[in-house]
Amino acid sequence: MSESLSRGRLHPDHESEYRALYQRDRDRIVHSAAFRRLQYKTQVFVSVMEGDYYRNRMTHTLEVTQIARTIARALGLNEDLAEALALAHDLGHGPFGHSGERALNDEMKSAGGFDHNAQGLRVVDFLEQRYARFPGLNLTYETREGYVKNYVRSGQSGRPRTLLGFVADESPTLEVQLVGHADEIAYDTHDLDDGLVSAALSDEQVRSVALWRQAEEQVTAEYPVLKEDKRLRWRTVVRRLIAMLVNDLLAETRRRLDAHGIHSVADVRKCESELVGFSRELAPRKLELETFLMDNFYMSPRVREMTALWQDRLRKLFAVYRADPTKLPEEHRRRAETQGDSLDRVIGDYVAGMTDRFASRQWELLVGK
Ligand code: MG
């Protein structure tokens, strides 16, 4: 994606003399409050309860970003854009991970529910207030398009791109497509790491996954010392898995670009099938790994117990604000009064912006004891 083809920003804005268009998007994202809050938001383990060692949404985001940049550079794509997209990809997540998202979605039914992608777009277009000249971060169309990656072109089944205000009959750029896969590569591998180190997963369990076995056989053949040192072995296997996934993605994406005769951004936008992706050999093995993580880690009693607790607490917190909106900060309350946003939407925006730590403090203050 060349900057000269950008569709620009939502509001009139001047450009920098020495910072490129997407580089500036990246800088605005890193300086935002929503980005800083990622450090106290749950990825899998609830950060307020499980200590500081495991991934949170900030460290996850940084891992996604470096994988995305590697892929963008190897494919000759726009590295600045890939970086901005990756840094922004989880800004719409609320506290307590996916269980928090479920609580928000249930509580916000009257306001159309909650979806972290749509929320991410609200954050960068509207909720961040840092500039006198415009609301939000005023990012370019191409960076904002990251939030629409799970939305489909017209004619396909799923939520349409037009729901978020994007052009109906085209596909997202290669940069948007690759960041979606960099996200998967990051969590598929770092969740194995966190699962093993926390003892939520065992060696025996992860060896039921074909990709893990293959990577483990390779690295222990190369470095026999790894048979004795399990921590070093886990780290080496995880690193090898990232390389295997990235290498497959690069080879398969090059094959698809070639097969579809893709030479320009216009070709990408016109092409109805996904151009960045994994090979037919690897895709089912990656799915096996993801199913394993779902059944044995995300759904494990240790993770579920904690997330169910906080899901319930978030609902109660929501109910307190609904019953007595004066408990909301004034700037949020004013939005419900002056901008026509429903009370549930305003509460949802406020709660979704909370870190795990802040939400748990509010719960103690307003509900707990
Ligand atoms: Mg992510």
Image (cartoon, grey):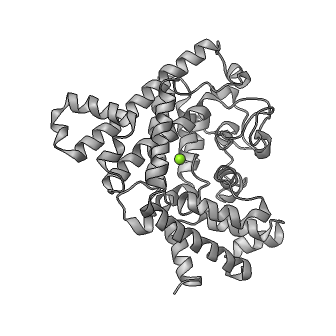
Which x, y percent locates residue 103? 63, 65
Which x, y percent locates residue 289? 45, 40
Which x, y percent locates residue 93? 59, 56
Which x, y percent locates residue 82? 55, 35
Count the labels in the image. 0
Q: Left or right? Give the position of 273 relative to 236.
A: right
Q: Is residue 313 visible?
A: yes
Q: Residue at horizontal 73%, vertical 64%?
A: 108
Of 207 and 38, which appears nearest the observer? 207
Of 323 and 37, which appears nearest the observer? 323
Q: Residue at horizontal 74%, vertical 22%?
A: 270
Q: Residue furthest bottom?
A: 369
Q: Left or right? Give the position of 258 relative to 238.
A: right
Of 106 and 354, which appears nearest the observer? 106
Q: Residue at horizontal 37%, vertical 65%?
A: 51
Q: Is residue 72 above or below residue 165?
A: above
Q: Where, quadrant-wise, is the N terminus in this rendering? A: top right
